[in-house]
Amino acid sequence: MRNSCILILLMLAFSASSAQRKGTFDFLRLDMNARAAGLYGSFVSMTDDPNLLLYNPSALATLTQPSASAGFLKHLLDVNAGSVTYAQEIEDLGTFGAGIVFIHYGSFERTDESMNVLGTFSAREFAVVVGWGAAVAENTFAGASLEFIHSSIAEYGSSALAAGAGVLYEIPSENITLGASLLHLGTQLDSYVKTRESLPLSLTIGITKRPEHLPVYLNLNFHKLTENNDSFFDRFNAFSFGAEFLLTESARLRVGYDNEKRRELKLGSSAGLAGFAVGGGVFFGTHRIDYAFNSYGAIGGLHRITIGMIVAP
């Protein structure tokens, strides 16, 4: 029982918001793919990536070719996570995507009240996501998604259904893209305890700008805009900034900053590099490899790698 309680606390601790409100399935807040992680989550207004299924389903409509992606995240301790996504346009209907997000917390000893080892158990969570995006007007895109979410600890389990929606608006004359999404709006079907817990509802807005004559995409996102705060302006403390530099036609460099992560990972008077991210990507014909490192300061950091490919029609 003691080990189970520790495990539940660990699962909730992966999201900073868990310390502020009661909720579950907070693994959905993790950036599973390396491109988004290199920008520290500033991704809601980016384009042409199948992983946008998990950030803003409307942006699926900006895909130029059928694409697939698989990512792996090495978390702290023995926790591993990842995602797989695929998206393809269907003529006259829009672009459809599907994916799975998963996290495995490792194995733990099962003990009795006298701390005698009775065996082991494991814990894991996953979400299956389907989404759609399409152009609804000139330079305007809309989309929606559905999720089935499941969590298990030993023989116990919890599941939920959720929906999401997003919009994307391009201003070609200014090289600007605006994006917004509302994700994980739903309810538990069954829970670990008698009281149903809330899902990690996420309202994000963002802007991407490519300055004229500069090979870089600049991103600014505001996250968790639905959460209660002491004042109106406190709602905007959870922001992230990212820059994707186009070094060559086949190479990218990314840096990112998450204001909330830096504030909450500060230990004593120093935060070190907590809240900062760096990454990059290279293209090999129809394939690409992306990597990202997110600093958690003195605690350590997270490594991610993602492999993507264009799927021939």
Image: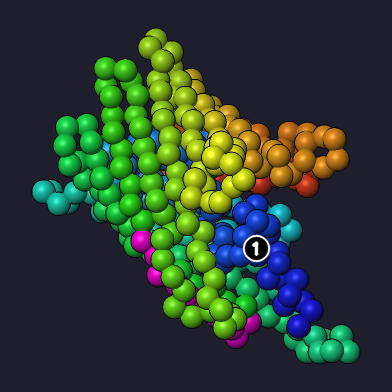
**Residue at the outermost right position:** 114
Secondary structure, mark 1, is helix
Asked whether residue 156 is drawn in magenta, I would say yes
CA neighbours of label 1 inside 10 A, class few (<14), some (14 to 19), many (20+): some
Q: Give, as a three-letter code, the residue at label 1.
A: Leu
- Residue matched to label 1: 12
Asked whether residue 288 is drawn in magenta, I would say no
Left or right? Give the position of 133 relative to 76: left
In magenta, the rendered stretch is 154-163
Name the main secondary structure of what is drawn in magenta.
strand
Q: Is residue 145 above or below residue 269?
A: below
Left or right? Give the position of 95 relative to 195: left
The one of 158 and 109 positioned closer to us in this rendering: 158
> What residue appears at the point 77 percent right and 77 percent down from the top-left corner?
3
> What residue appears at the point 76 percent right and 83 percent down from the top-left corner?
1
Left or right? Give the position of 305 relative to 249: right
Quarter occupied by residue 271:
top right
